[in-house]
Amino acid sequence: MAIAAARPRAPHAADPAFSRGRLIEEEPSPRRNDFRRDCDRIIHSAAFRRLKHKTQVFISHEGDHFRTRLTHTLEVTQIARALARSLGLDEDLAEALALAHDLGHPPFGHAGERALDECMAAHGGFDHNAQALRVVTELERRYAEFDGLNLTWETLEGIAKHNGPVMDRQGRGLGRYAGRSVPETFIAYAKTQDLELWTHAGPEAQAAAIADDIAYDAHDLDDALRADMFPIDDLSELPLIGDLMRQLHARYPKADRSRLVNEMTRRLISAMVGDVVAESERRITALNPWTSADIRAAGEPTIRFSAAMAETDKAIKQFLTPRMYRHGRVMGIMNDAQRVVRELFEHYVRRPEDLPPEWGRAIAGADEAIRARRVSDFIAGMTDNYALEEHARFFDLTPDLR
């Protein structure tokens, strides 16, 4: 990573000594600040471990070198820390938010999420950001005194607002929730603890969110090329990447394809990180914030791409959509994966006694909405392999997803 020098803590950076605290008060640690403790709690959670066996983009069947949700999460974390270090933000909080950002993803990547959302359509739908909040506030059962991980307000806020404000003060959906219902998880949790869902998140959360975009762009290109989903020469049509590839061919005319792809990936990440740092510094100078509250109230993200890099980011995603995300080989597997999730959901709702005892007891006698949500929770926590194993227990034909 080209941008690595630490800067003095910015006045608008989150300060663990002045955190808004945890919902349930705890004794402070003599060795770790509150944001570092949040990182450690997330890393030691069951949901984090399960990311190892959850699909990132649906080509995990191709081999062991492709990203999983866990390796993607670690790569996002590295980029988020680099951004925080370069901008004088709190690295531990940025790390905690990057580590937690995908905890709510179900098995089989976005295919699994679409299937669960369809299954839950009558009960508020399914959203992986809202599910991540459920995981860390309710579903993890590691502590004797509370459910969830009892994370700090700043970490919970960043998880909830990973993609920006959730709703306005009147409860109308914003951003990805505009024009549709806000997930009930957000509304229900706001009654317990106000996460100010109408504002943007703090700067560390914004850094983690854009680190996610950078990792997606660079590493999905890498994985797609590893899977031979398109010729490497197709990259010549992309802004920035086309120039990078021409420079690499000129500098390393005898380098093999895999080395060129690796060089392109790391140079793309470096260019994107450098762009975010420069654009964010420009915006911070103009805003002149004195606290993280000033960043939240700015009305738009402060940690962001320049206009030119935002167009590059958009072009990469548009390039990958037909060549990778909608590739015929991937779509066939996605359709099979969605069927697995739908059939598991229908089976457990109909026969909750087939759930593990602790899950089945929790919904005994519950109404339809509660039963559906708990079944959704159970399936969302599955790894890809466990979902297939469970499907094979109840159905005669289980796809091998190859």
Image (cartoon, grey):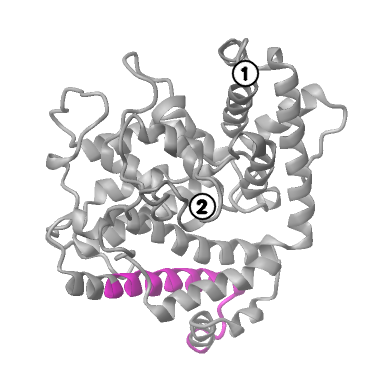
Amino acid beneath label 1: Asp
| Earlier residue among tags 2 and 1 | 2
Asked if residue 272 lies in the magenta stretch, the reply is: yes
The residue at which mark 2 appears reads as 177
Magenta-drawn stretch, dominant element (helix, strand or loop): helix
What range of the chain is rendered magenta? 250-279
Amino acid beneath label 2: Tyr
Q: Residue at x 70, y 52 (%)?
A: 62
Question: Relative to 280, is 368 on the left or the right?
Answer: right
Q: Report the residue that reaches farthest toward the bottom.
A: 250
Label 2 Cα crowd, 10 Å radius (few <14 / some 14-19 / many 20+): some
Label 1 Cα crowd, 10 Å radius (few <14 / some 14-19 / many 20+): few
Q: Position of residue 203 (x, y in %)?
A: 27, 57
The residue at which mark 1 appears reads as 367
Res 355 quadrant in image: top right
Query: In this orientation, which residue lies closer to the viewer: 298 or 12?
Result: 298
